[in-house]
Amino acid sequence: MIATSATATVPVACVALWRDNPDIAFTLPLILGRAGLAVALVDSADALLHAADTGAIFLVIDCSQAPDASARCRAVITCTAVPVHICHPSEPFVVALAPVARGPLVWLPPEWTGLPLLHHQWVPQS
């Protein structure tokens, strides 16, 4: 499901993902879907906060390639107590945000989203 405004509806047992890297927007919903979670893809802080207000069980901010990663995260984590998973290459980046967060933060390394499976060169075994 794609939500692009603050008025989008979020299904029950939903996670909302503010997408950045198109590969993560593809793989993470597959992984979370296997766990029985629906993933709403959003394109703004307002839409992510709306998802938090309407029952998302946790939020994901993909900052794996975003040049404005800090501002992107702060726009959300300072406004909600819903747990936020931050997909970023650096754990210290996420730890540094903790003092301004209203709720729990979890570091989500991009590699944990299935990216190695997309970018691996599969060579047949002889």
Image (spheres, rainbow, N blue to C red):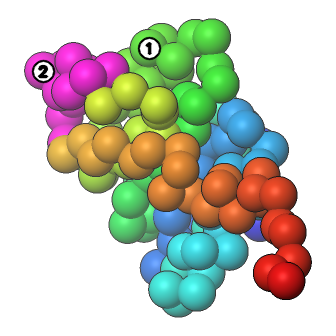
Is 56 or 105 nearer to us in this picture? 105
What is the chief secondary structure element of the magenta stretch? Answer: helix
Q: Earlier in the sequence, mark 1 or mark 2?
A: 1
* Secondary structure state at the residue bearing disc 2: helix
- Residue 22, horizontal then vertical, whole percent: 80, 44
Q: Which residues are magenta?
A: 92-103
- Please tell me which residue is depicted at 48% across the width and 12% down the height of the picture: 71
- Residue 105, horizontal then vertical, whole percent: 25, 42
Using the numbered discs, state the Cα–Cα distance from disc 1 to disc 2 in whole angstroms: 13 Å
Tell me: residue 82, above or below residue 92: below
Q: Look at mark 1 in the image and give the residue it sits on.
A: 70
Identity, as a three-letter code, of the amino acid under mark 1:
Ser
- Please tell me which residue is depicted at 65% across the width and 56% down the height of the picture: 116
How many residues crowd around disc 1 within 10 Å: few (fewer than 14), some, or many (20 or more)?
some
83 displayed left or right of 35: left
Residue 41, by quadrant, is bottom right
Q: Look at mark 2 in the image and give the residue it sits on.
A: 99
53 displayed left or right of 97: right
Classify the position of the C terminus by image quarter: bottom right
- Can the viewer see residue 78? no
How many residues crowd around disc 2 within 10 Å: few (fewer than 14), some, or many (20 or more)?
few
59 displayed left or right of 102: right
Is 71 or 11 nearer to us in this picture? 71
- Please tell me which residue is depicted at 49% across the width and 86% down the height of the picture: 35
* Secondary structure state at the residue bearing disc 1: helix
Q: Is residue 96 magenta?
A: yes
